Every structure is written in structure tokens, then in C-alpha cells.
Image: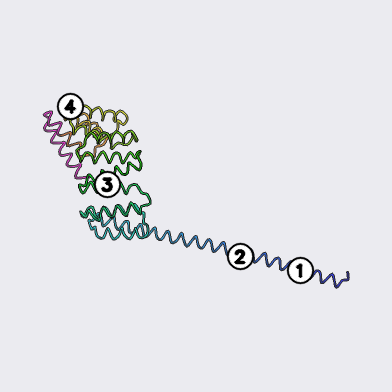
Amino acid sequence: MVLSDLLILMRLEAVVNDQIFIIKYQKNIMKWLIFLLIISSYLFVFSFAASADDEVTKWLESGDAYLKEENYEQAIQSYNNVLQLDSINYRAWDGKATSYVKQGDYNNAIRTYEEWIKNGNGDISSWYFKGDAFKKFGKYDEALKLYEQLLLQDPEDGYAWFLKGDILIYLNRFNEAIEAFNKSIEIDPEFSSPWYRKGHVLEMSSQLEEALLHYNEWLNKHPDDSKAWTNVGLVLYDLGRYDEALQAYNKSIELDNTDGVTYIRKADALRKLGDYKESEDCFILAYEKFSNS
């Protein structure tokens, strides 16, 4: 091979190497461009989502403020603005329906709950609140049907059993109410509400000793439950055991001294025991608690 041929080959190799470098460089540039495009897209999406979240927060706060001010029409408009951005927003659906309830607008309240059930992505609370709306409008039979429908879908829903028991009280079906509360307690023994309501039903049906045993069973597990101590005091008062009732009220106040109702009950017990001066002082304390609440 002559020198000229060798030089030609060397030039060709250099050209090939340059082309390979250019191709590799172009590929790297394309990779970086694609990467930057993806990052830009994510940043745009995140920025849009953050902006939408800010709008949702703004309208929710606006709706809550209007609801507190009893400006229900403006509250509904604010909650509608939220639902345009977030169709499954729990607070917006509840706030909108509550606004209708506060206005006494039964049809729109129920329709809102039905829309929530339909569009709420399986949010079970929409069923609970619809039942509560039936209750507030005195539609107890409709509420009961709704809770029974819920329990057909999920027989282990302890909260639905509690709500069913609660509505049965309004229908004066006390034995069935107790059965429903028992089922709720069986499913979730730590859920306090069915314990309280069952005790209340036992009191209403003059089963005072049973009510006392029931509350004491709860207090054996939860001795620091001030509300339960107040309930025990109520039963003891109804049994004419005023000294023991007073002790129960004092225990409740020791655990929570903010509840004006307990002070009123204590004042009643003191009056029964002939301690009128302390009873009067207790009524004054109750008034102060209510004023500060």
C-alpha cells in the first residue's frame, strides 16, 4: 500500500469517526430533549393541580363562612364551585346539602344527597348523611328504609346498626332499637355511642336497674369517660339514690369540668338532698359554662 492510499484510508476513518460522534451526540441531544419535555409536562400538571387545589380550598372556606353566617344561597354557590373542580369533595357535598337542610328545603336536600351517592365514588358517609336529613325532616320511615338498605349491602357496618337503632327510638320501637344497638356493640365494642343510646332506651322504658348495669359495664372498661358518669348519675337520680347520683356527677366533673349539663344535674341532686345554697351555686356555675361554650 502506497503512502497516498494510506492517507486516504486515514481520512476516511476520521470522517467515519466524526459521523459516529455526530450521531451519538444527536442521540444524546434527543434523549435530553425528550427528558426535558417529560419534566416540563409533569411540572405543568403539578402546577395545574396545585392551582386547582388552591381554588378548591378558597371556595370551601368561602362556603363554610357563608354557612356559618346563615347566608345559604351564597354557601350553595361556593360549594357548587368546589364540585365543578372536585366532584367527590366530601365537605362540599355535605356543606351544600346542609345549606338546604338549614333552609328547610327538603326536596333539594334529599336530591343533593342522592347526587352525592351517585357521584361520590362510593363514599358511604353520603348514605349516613342522607339518613340524617330524613331524620331532621321527620321522615323516620324513609331513614329506616335507607339504613336497612345499607345493612343489606354490608351487615357488618356497625355505624349503620347504630343509626338504625337511633331512628327506631323515634319510631317508639324500643326493643328493636336495643337489638340494633347490641349488634353495633358486638361489631365494635369500643364505639361509645350505641352504649349511651342503649342505656338511654333502657331508661326511657323504665328498666333503670338494667340501665345502671349497662353503664357500669362500659365504665369498667372506660373509667375516665365523664359522659358515662353523668349517665350513671341520671339513672341513680331516677332511682331516688341522690347521694350516689351526686357522687357520680362529681366524678364526671372531676374528669371534665366544662359540661354545663352535668352541673345542672348536680344542682338537682343537691336540691333533693336539701342543700339549697350549694344547689344555687351549682346552677350559677352551669350558666357560666353555657355562656362560655
Q: Is residue 54 above or below residue 252?
A: below
Asked if disc 2 and disc 4 are in contact, CB closer than 8 Å, the reply is no
Name the residue tied to disc 2: 30
Which stretch did the figure color magenta? 268-293
| Crowdedness near tag 1: few (<14), some (14–19) or many (≥20) residues, C-alpha within 10 Å | few
Q: Is residue 244 above or below residue 260?
A: above
Amino acid, disc 2: Met
Foreground: disc 2 or disc 3:
3
Amino acid, disc 4: Asp
Marks 3 and 4, how far apart at CA: 41 Å
The one nearer the camera, 280 or 33, is: 33
Marks 1 and 2, how far apart at CA: 24 Å
Marks 1 and 4, how far apart at CA: 108 Å
Marks 2 and 3, how far apart at CA: 59 Å
Image coords of residue 119 (percent x, y)? 35, 54
Amino acid, disc 3: Gly
Name the residue tied to disc 1: 14
Name the residue tied to disc 3: 131
The one nearer the camera, 279 or 228, is: 228
Rendered image: mark on residue 50 = none
- Please tell me which residue is depicted at 71% across the width and 68% down the height of the picture: 19
| Crowdedness near tag 2: few (<14), some (14–19) or many (≥20) residues, C-alpha within 10 Å | few
Asked if disc 3 and disc 4 are in contact, CB closer than 8 Å, the reply is no
Image coords of residue 232 (percent x, y)? 22, 31
Foreground: disc 3 or disc 1:
3
Sequence-first tag of 3 and 4: 3
Amino acid, disc 1: Ala
Sequence-first tag of 3 and 1: 1
Name the residue tied to disc 4: 243
- Please tell me which residue is depicted at 25% across the width and 56% down the height of the picture: 108
